[in-house]
């Protein structure tokens, strides 16, 4: 990553229209916002306007989300089907208290990559694969030996795929106005002890931590045309921001749709995301991804022929439809907590700097969710404040991973929602950010921005210490 130049280059947008503060900003999820205390359970509450009768479904869904799956056959068939290869035994193990995951701790060999994984892929090598990518029936081409993601764990009698090793290189310190210095760490990823032979020589990798779970139902309820209008918004036009949609295949709907979820917007719906996680992360089949062996490849023959957890009583898949639907319902209704100190002088000062720095061009502050038979009533027609446009943006070479996922190239990432970001440490016990957790603070995350965000980052670099503190206080209050 090029080291930012601390000398002033770009001033704040003096003529930027900072919208008048609206009281609804204190409730980022509209009427679904959780008003519960901002403690370690802040991301685990249901939509506040959920009817009492549906709270039962939410709690049962939470139970399935926390279920520890086991290998088949076992004495409890309701939990059978784990693996044979996997990254975690439960959804909750990756999404720590429904918050974001983290990379393994530096210097702790016993800390495994549970809430972080390495996606794998190779370039298309024939017309059939090129056609699948062009038609969006595939988001990427899996590695022929290790599949679509690297799995560090295996059930008894099977070999895990190896070990993911991460080392960091400290970059030259960046000195900011006022004398504060920030040192960024650049990660390097290595597959050690590969148990199934060498991967493809043209292997592409993409490290990713599990994202936080709050507000997914509200993001799913935004009208597609409102998302696609993002580049026409005044803040984006003023900055010359060109957001790009990712069009992906939706198994849940049987058609190509706008990608909204995942670090490169590779999934269209919550159901698609859940099915992909069951299959790739835990090796469990659902009605949307019916392969019992999950991500096992033809090269891993013992894995493909291992016993599975499907039973005549529960249906053809290891995750019964009723359990799958409950997890989707739970994920759809994890509420966004209310903003902290909203409307305070510090919040308003940081808010103005956020707009005048150009951050709002990609971190689009608000939407009004749609309505209709496909949208849950409690999530419909809500004014929400997620601070994302859900589009792909070139983030520069510093964050590039060389991995293509459908329309997203290695430099492109979906704008991450900012709601709840300040509660990350309270909820998940760490404060690492970006797709691979390389940033150890919000400020480090900002300093990794490049590409379309380079100008906005340079504005942040030139802020006075007081202005910088206000901006960070605002972001951490969302």
Image (spheres, rainbow, N blue to C red):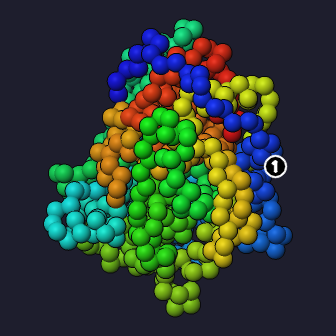
Q: Secondary structure at mark 1?
A: loop
| Front residue (pair 68, 421) | 421
Residue 75 image-quadrant placement: bottom right
Residue 271 shown left or right of residue 336 in the figure: left
Tell me if residue 335 can be seen. Answer: no
| Front residue (pair 62, 360) | 360
Name the residue rendered at 44%, 11% in the picture.
7
In the image, residue 118 sits, relative to residue 377, either above or below, namely above
| Front residue (pair 258, 401) | 258
Residue 109 shown left or right of residue 204 in the figure: right
| Front residue (pair 420, 428) | 420
Name the residue rendered at 52%, 91% in the picture.
312
Tell me if residue 375 can be seen. Answer: yes
Percent coordinates x, y for residue 369 in the rendering? 66, 60
Label 1: which residue? 36
**Crowding at mark 1 (Cα within 10 Å: few <14, some 14-19, many 20+):** some
Placement of the N terminus among the 4 image quadrants: top left
Residue 352 image-quadrant placement: top right
Placement of the C terminus among the 4 image quadrants: top right
Percent coordinates x, y for residue 190 in the rendering? 30, 42
Residue 360 shown left or right of residue 254 in the figure: right
């Amino acid at each position: 990553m090029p080291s930012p130049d601390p000398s002033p280059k770009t001033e704040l947008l003096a003529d930027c229209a900072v919208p008048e503060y609206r009281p609804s900003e204190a409730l980022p999820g509209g009427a679904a916002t959780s008003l519960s205390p901002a403690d370690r359970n802040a991301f685990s509450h249901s939509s506040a306007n959920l009817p009492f009768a549906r709270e039962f479904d939410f709690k049962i869904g939470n139970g399935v989300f926390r279920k520890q799956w086991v290998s088949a056959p076992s004495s409890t068939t309701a939990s059978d089907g784990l693996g044979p290869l996997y990254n975690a035994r439960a959804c909750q193990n990756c999404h720590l208290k429904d918050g974001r995951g983290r990379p393994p701790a530096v210097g702790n060999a016993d800390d495994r990559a549970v809430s972080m994984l390495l996606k794998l892929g190779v370039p298309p090598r024939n017309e059939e694969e090129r056609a699948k990518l062009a038609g969006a029936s595939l988001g990427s081409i899996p590695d022929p030996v290790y599949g679509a993601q690297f799995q560090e764990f295996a059930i008894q009698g099977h070999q895990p795929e190896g070990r993911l090793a991460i080392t960091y290189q400290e970059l030259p310190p960046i000195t900011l106005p006022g004398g504060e210095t920030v040192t960024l760490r650049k990660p390097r990823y290595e597959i050690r002890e590969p148990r199934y032979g060498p991967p493809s020589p043209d292997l592409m990798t993409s490290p990713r931590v599990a994202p936080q779970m709050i507000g997914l139902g509200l993001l799913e309820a935004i009208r597609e045309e409102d998302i696609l209008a993002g580049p026409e918004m005044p803040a984006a036009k003023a900055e010359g921001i060109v957001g790009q949609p990712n069009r992906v295949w939706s198994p849940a709907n049987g058609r190509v749709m706008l990608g909204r979820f995942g670090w490169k917007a590779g999934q269209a719906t919550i159901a698609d995301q859940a099915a992909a996680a069951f299959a790739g992360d835990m090796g469990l089949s659902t009605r949307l991804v019916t392969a019992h062996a999950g991500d096992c490849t033809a090269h891993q023959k013992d894995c493909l022929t291992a016993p599975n957890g499907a039973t005549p009583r529960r249906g053809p898949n290891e995750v019964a439809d009723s359990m799958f639907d409950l997890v989707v319902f739970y994920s759809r209704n994890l509420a966004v907590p209310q903003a902290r100190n909203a409307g305070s002088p510090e919040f308003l000062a940081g808010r103005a700097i956020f707009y005048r720095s150009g951050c709002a061009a990609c971190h689009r502050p608000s939407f009004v969710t749609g309505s209709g038979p496909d949208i849950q009533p409690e999530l419909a027609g809500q004014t929400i404040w997620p601070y994302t446009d859900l589009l792909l943006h070139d983030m520069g070479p510093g964050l590039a991973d060389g991995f293509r996922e459908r329309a997203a190239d290695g430099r492109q990432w979906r704008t991450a929602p900012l709601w709840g970001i300040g509660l990350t440490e309270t909820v998940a016990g760490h404060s690492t950010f970006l797709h691979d957790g390389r940033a150890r603070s919000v400020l480090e995350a900002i300093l990794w921005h490049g590409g379309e965000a380079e100008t906005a980052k340079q504005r942040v670099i030139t802020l006075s210490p007081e202005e910088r503190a206000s901006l960070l206080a605002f972001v951490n209050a969302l």
